[in-house]
Image: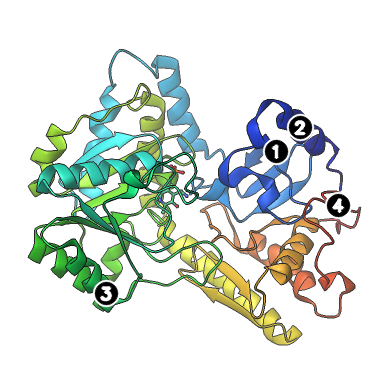
Amino acid sequence: MSNRHDLQLRQRAAKVVPGGMTGHLNAASLPAGYPQFFERGQGCRVWDVDGNEYIDFMCSWGPNLLGHHHPVVDEAARRQQALGDCLDGPTARFVELAERFVARSAHADWVLFQKNGTDATTVCLMVARAATGKRKVLVATKAYHGADPWCTPIPQGITPEDRAHLIHYTYNDIASLEAAVAQAGTDLAAIVCAAFKHDLGIDQELPTPEFARRARELCDQAGAALILDEVRAGFRVHAGGSWETVGVRPDLSAWSKSIANGYALAAVTGVDALREAATRIYTTGSFWSGGVAMAAGLATIEVADAQDVVGHVQAMGQRFRDGIAAQSASHGVPVRQTGPAALPLILFDEDPGYDKGAVFTVEALRRGVYLHPKHNMFLSLAHTVQDIDRALQATDAGLCRRRPTLRPPLSRSHVRVPETRTPQ
Ligand code: PMP
């Protein structure tokens, strides 16, 4: 298993890109042995620049809901590309997709489109503040809502004033939510909740119905907006919106990642009561109305609904989870698997530095399975029972206690992977 080209590209990138790579795609945050650069993807497989093939459990960190290069989506995008993408204004796809989105999202009366998840969460805050004339926004401690100054997790290059009106609460903790609402006093604009708790490196938590209902009540009492961040969970947990599972509807939802199967698109959906405020805010972008991503979005919804993608990713995720649980029991290596099965997270007991997770995922990587040691993963429509079972063969080796390679890798900067990959 070679990584020569990857290393060369990293060296070149280090000279012309600060840090060699921005944000979550910097492979320095992954265990030694992970590639940073990829050549191509097809279905549930990706190939790195050295030609190593992996069964992909990250799906581009979410966007590839139907699998890489889904033929129906790519054909719709190609047809639109031939007509035009970035024109003097939107195409008819804009209206068609807005209609589909509103029809499909249980709470939604209208939609605004953007490009990235951060655009969508930021627009949600603007709509809520424009509607209420209030400033305070409640966010859960450690929750990720994007990389704008109000929400980026690393507070470099921003000012305390950028976050002056944020108040924190603990996800699923009603008392802490009530305390945060009390702190906001008469100045509460919105409560922001992730679709479920999916903070990096800790166990995931589904929202409790009591917590979701209380968030709804508190917003109603204060005249504030309940904002659901669906960027990560959207289209994988419930077709109509993730909190349909707990019977609570938000006022605003932020969507991105999977809604156009890898084409750059984001959306904010909202209720009628916020329509007028959404009309007043000024929010736009040179590429936001591009026709190709919207054509891809229409095709994605068509395929997702026709093929019950939610049911499929849940079933594949559960098969993977059951397999891991059986291996964990038979090898006597306790693991914790939390959150929706379609967005799996595997953490090890007594593993504060994620060393066991690193060994496990690197062993799987060497056997052609791309997992993440501390971020939730993603299933797609392209994963078959055979893919899951093949991946489980790799994880079994990774979990096997007797293997000498269960020792953690020597150093994070040691990126060379020995030629130990089992032939597929
Ligand atoms: N919200 C959540 C829950 C996310 O997971 C992400 C991206 N990981 C974002 C917002 C920001 O999305 P983007 O990176 O597309 O700006």
Q: Nearer the viewer, residue 192 or 153?
A: 153
SS of the residue at dot 1? loop
Inspect the image, locate mark 1, and give the three-letter code of the amino acid beneath it: Phe
Q: Among all residues in the image, which is located at the extreme right?
A: 419
Q: Of the residues under marks 1 and 4, which one precedes in the sequence? A: 1
Residue 417: assigned label = 4
The answer to whether the residue bearing label 1 lies less than 8 angstroms from the nearest atom of ligand 1 is no
Cβ atoms at labels 3 and 2 below 8 Å apart: no
How did the renderer colour the structure? Answer: rainbow
Could you say which quadrant of the image residue 181 lies in?
bottom left
Residue 37: assigned label = 1
Q: Of the residues under marks 2 and 1, which one precedes in the sequence? A: 2
Query: Which of label 1 and label 3 is nearer to you?
Result: 3
Residue 9: assigned label = 2
Q: Is residue 352 left or right of residue 300?
A: right
Q: Position of residue 10 (x, y in %)?
A: 75, 35
The residues tagged by marks 4 and 3 sit, at their Cα atoms, a distance apart of 46 Å
Cβ atoms at labels 2 and 1 below 8 Å apart: yes
The residues tagged by marks 1 and 3 sit, at their Cα atoms, a distance apart of 41 Å
